[in-house]
Image: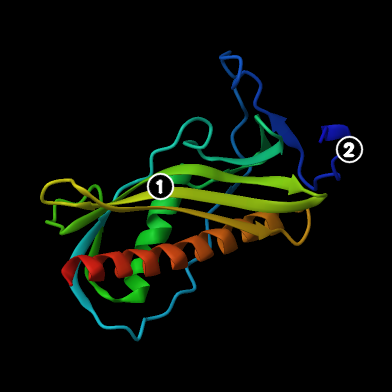
Amino acid sequence: MSLSRMPRLAMPLLVLSGLLSGCSLLPEREPVRLFTLSEPSLSASPGSACDLTLRVDTPSAGSPLDGPRLLIMPSPGEFQAYAGARWRDDAPLLVRDHLIEAFRLDGRLAAVVDDASRARSDATLASQLGAFYSRYRKGTLEVMVRLDVQLLDEANREVLASQRIEVAAPSDDDGLESVVEAFGHAADQLASELVDWTLRELASQKS
């Protein structure tokens, strides 16, 4: 769908020209507003505890998903960014921190650490961030988040299990606040699915 036929966005868009052509971007003004994901809504799980430490690696991502821009894909293969707004950190770091907090709130693991920690861990979650943007689908704005995950045995780096988790969350309207809220809902659902999947896989490895 061309931009001329798209619903008018409440915030202007900055075209990321050169992403596909390989040209350098022109210098940008400092961001006006910084956003972050809302806290995970998970609560402590009534399930049995697992005496394991999990390391959550920062997801890998290609450009422009590896940066701090709030992205929209108005048509396949084309990225644009909301002008005057940024995430408070690069998107992969936001996702990692959101997942770690979700695991800690769930409470079924003995400990959860990030990839900067020197603590010993029993298993590692490695992943690739394949989608973290909004898009128009049948005239409705929605947020897409996709993560390809591998659960690794920390002792030998063997892949114990792998899974693709993809979530779409609708935005109430085209306003930036609604879009950011939809990102939070999508990240929350992804975290919930990933926590349950990881605990099931860890339990099956112990049995």
Residue 121: which quarter of the image?
bottom left
Identified at 40% across, 47% down, the residue is 93
Pick whichever of labels 1 and 2 is earlier in the sequence. Answer: 2
* Mark 1 Cα shell of 10 Å, populated few (<14), some (14-19), many (≥20): some
- Looking at the rendered structure, the number of numbered marks drawn on it comes to 2
> x%, y% of residue 28?
61, 26
Q: Is residue 146 above or below residue 193?
A: above
The residue lying at 10 percent from left, 51 percent from top is: 155
| Above or below: residue 166 compared with residue 105 | above
Secondary structure found at label 1: helix
Furthest residue to the bottom?
46
Marks 1 & 2, CB-CB < 8 Å contact? no
Judging from the image, the colouring scheme is: rainbow
Mark 1 vs mark 2: in front: 2
Q: Give amino acid for label 2.
A: Arg
Q: Residue at x 81, y 36 (%)?
A: 1
Q: Is residue 145 left or right of residue 8?
A: left
User: Taking 151 as reference, is 53 above or below it?
Assistant: below
Residue at x 49% of width, y 36% of height: 67
Q: Give the Cα distance between marks 1 and 2.
A: 34 Å
Residue 36, horizontal then vertical, whole percent: 53, 54
Camera-side residue of 132 and 50: 50
Q: Which mark is residue 5?
A: 2
Q: Which residue is mark 1?
A: 93
Q: Label 1 sits on what residue type?
A: Leu
Q: Residues within 10 Å of mark 2 (few under 14, many from 20)?
A: few
SS category of the residue bearing label 2: helix
Image coordinates for residue 187, horizontal then vertical, percent: 52, 59
